[in-house]
Amino acid sequence: MKQQGEEGGKASVPLYAKVGWGLAWLVMLGLTAMILRNCATSVFYGLQTDAPRVEQAYQQGMSDGRLGQGQAQRGQEENSVLRKAYIKGYRTGLDQGRSPSAGRP
């Protein structure tokens, strides 16, 4: 005598489980694609950008941070390496501008 849900001695997988596995795979493939795209653009811009340009973006961010200017001017940079250098400099400049001994020698 066969029990309900069994065919030929095997238990069948419910439809909701199959759909759940399919959606889980789609989410994992989507995340993998996004991570690979991010890595590829970082490598591409890293090889394309020279050290003086990175240093210039860092110094520009630091001076904007010290003056308290918004980072909207250079924060929209397409090159992710230059954008990260600018933001790092901006945060450093903000910290230096807020420190109590910023104006004293």
Image (cartoon, rainbow, N blue to C red):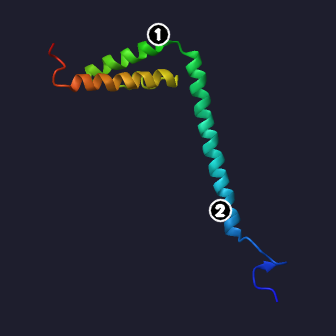
Name the spot of residue 24 as percent of width and height, x first. Answer: 64, 56
Q: Earlier in the sequence, mark 1 or mark 2?
A: 2
Question: In the rendered image, which quarter is residue 85 located in?
Answer: top left
| Name of the residue lying farthest toward the right | 8
Residue in the image at 66% along x and 51% along y: 26
Image side of residue 36 versus residue 4, left or right: left
Residue in the image at 42% along x and 25% along y: 75
Instruction: State the quadrant of the N terminus.
Output: bottom right
**Residue 52, disc:** 1
Image side of residue 96 versus residue 86, left or right: left
Mark 2 residue type: Gly
Image side of residue 102 versus residue 39, left or right: left
Name the spot of residue 37 as percent of width and height, x first. Answer: 62, 34
Mark 1 residue type: Pro
Crowd class of label 1 (few under 14; some 14 to 19; many from 20; radius 10 Å)? few
Crowd class of label 2 (few under 14; some 14 to 19; many from 20; radius 10 Å)? few
**Residue 20, disc:** 2
